[in-house]
Amino acid sequence: MPAAAAMNAVPQLALLVEGRDRKGLLHDMTAAILRHDGDVHSVEILERGERSAIFWELEQVGDPDALIAALESIDVVETVRRLPSMVQVYGKRIIVVGAGAQVGQVAIGAVGEADRHNIRGEKISVDTIPIVGEANLAAAVRAVARLPRAACLVLAGSLMGGEVSDAVDDVRSHGILVVSLNMAGSVPEHADLVVTDPVQAGVMAVMAVAETARFDLARVRGQRF
Amino acid sequence: MPAAAAMNAVPQLALLVEGRDRKGLLHDMTAAILRHDGDVHSVEILERGERSAIFWELEQVGDPDALIAALESIDVVETVRRLPSMVQVYGKRIIVVGAGAQVGQVAIGAVGEADRHNIRGEKISVDTIPIVGEANLAAAVRAVARLPRAACLVLAGSLMGGEVSDAVDDVRSHGILVVSLNMAGSVPEHADLVVTDPVQAGVMAVMAVAETARFDLARVRGQRF
């Protein structure tokens, strides 16, 4: 199973732990989780400084109620609540990166198509960033592998290559699909799929990751539309 | 300083720690960070299972090189690399939630406006999810407070109220701005700003969080455009 797929599974237990903040609090929580055999699927620090709010997604916890009691017994912790996991709420993510005008058109296609699948019980969100310059673009592409729940990257621009193409190879090696607009530069040669119309690129990106769609990217890989 | 603003500062040190995975690894890393006086700004688990990749954003580390050496000395750790922080790469986030057709139009406005600010050195990204049903919508709105770097939420629909309005109050209490389309239901009464045209709603949301824009939401709060 590619890394991206493993990260998109729904975890056993999602907990929001709130209270006052102090140094070493995260370490005390990881100790409690370890004592209850928990494996950390994800952790998000929502508030820090005076107050603390930490959101944990956990696996393999032997006795969830006992773990909740253990977290509640930490001196500064005030409340521990069970919440839905982020993948249940926001689902898989399509990331669109590039020039504003084209990113907007890809978003129109992707959001419209995600709506149709989300109505049938899927959860797909579409995240975008308009960005300028090869170094910024390469950093944003590389960082897609560090975004939780990222399933597909769409490159929306007119000229991308060099460092960006290396970043595309890197992201694909993490199990993330890459769709490129038909454009100048070497990026299209490094993508899984090349699409000329930005609206269609957005639609196809969503179809490729939706479980309710009958679109197998493996059957069209390397083609240009 | 509201929680959202504190979370959007650039952290002192961002490290990607990679190697094999095993139970208790996160706990061993928090121990090393604590020994070097580090305060955890954010942590992201990128890979788990066979391989492990954990991205740390840290503050107040006494001696960064000593901490890196301490992390490298953990049995399963293979490499520790300094990376740019997520706020440096993706910046502040505008979150757009609602019905597909309207979410797409808000995205057009927000992405186009973000492009203009990002060209001048800002980093603003626009994240969307088309979603159906009061319970799903309320969960998505509430979870905005759990999204890293979220600065503004735009509600794009034609009818929202009840549980969604409660969720809007909750998100605003976390220091996140809320822009609502002019629509049926009670949500517009709970928002910071109500805008009729979805493209303008996207533009205004970006203007409200951009430091390069001269738009002070406090001066138009409660108005309808």
Image: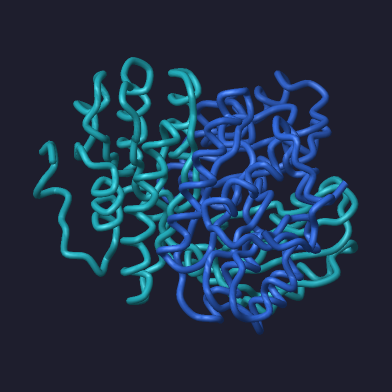
Chain colours: A cyan, B blue
Give the image location of residue A189, x and y in percent.
19, 26
Q: Is residue A37 left or right of residue A105?
A: right
User: What residue lies at 79% left-to-right and 28% top-to-bottom?
Assistant: B61
Q: Is residue A67 visible?
A: no
Q: Nearer the viewer, residue B115 or A135?
A: B115
Q: Is residue A144 visible?
A: yes
Identity of the residue furthest to the bottom in this view: B162
Closest to the observer: A116 or A57?
A116
Image x and y of residue A132, in percent = 48, 24
Quadrant, the C terminus of chain B: bottom right
Q: Is residue A162 above or below residue B222?
A: above
Give percent across and percent down for residue A214. 16, 64
Residue A19 coordinates in the image, percent (x, y): 85, 63
Residue A213 as seen in the image, left or right of residue B2: left
Q: Quadrant of residue B215?
A: top right
The picture quadrant where one finds residue A145 is top left
Where on the picture, by quarter, is residue A52?
A: bottom right
Residue situated in front as seen by the camera: B152 or A12: B152
Furthest-top residue in this view: A162
Residue under the image location 65 percent in, 30 percent down: B14
